Image (cartoon, rainbow, N blue to C red):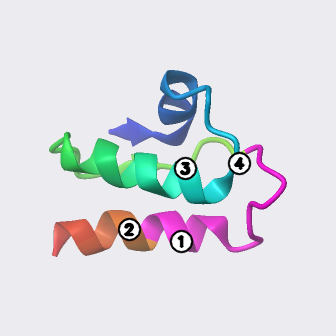
Amino acid sequence: MLYLSEILLKHQALDNFDALIDVVKMEMQQTNERFFRFDVKPPFSDTPNNWETHLENIFYLKQV
């Protein structure tokens, strides 16, 4: 299982939500995980209200 908190810890230099999306895409290409857990909210001022949907779409579109 891939955890959002682990991605954020691994990439502490991130400073906005768009950069997080790029890193999530990269992390998902490098793993064969079938599940992605949103265990924390991204701490960026530009994090949209529907951030889970954004990240979920990236993950599940990769699965198709």
Q: Is residue 37 left or right of residue 25?
A: right
Q: Which residue is mark 4?
A: 41
Residue 58 is labelled as 2
At numbered mark 2, what does the secondary structure look like: helix, strand or loop? helix
Kindly identify the residue that appears in the image at 31 percent across and 69 percent down. 60
Q: Which residue is mark 1?
A: 54
CA separation in Å, label 2 and label 4: 16 Å
- The amino acid type found where label 2 is placed reads Ile
- Is 54 a magenta residue? yes
Residue extending farthest to the right is 45
Task: State the count of labels.
Answer: 4
- Which mark's residue is nearer the viewer, 2 or 4? 2
* Label 4 neighbour load within 10 Å: few <14, some 14-19, many 20+: few
Mark 1–mark 2 CB contact (< 8 Å)? yes
Kindly identify the residue that appears in the image at 62 percent across and 29 percent down. 13
* Magenta residue span: 43-56
Rendered-image quadrant of the N terminus: top left
Kindly identify the residue that appears in the image at 55 percent across and 51 percent down. 19
Q: Position of residue 9 (x, y in %)?
A: 56, 24
Q: Which residue is mark 3?
A: 20
Q: Earlier in the sequence, mark 4 or mark 1?
A: 4
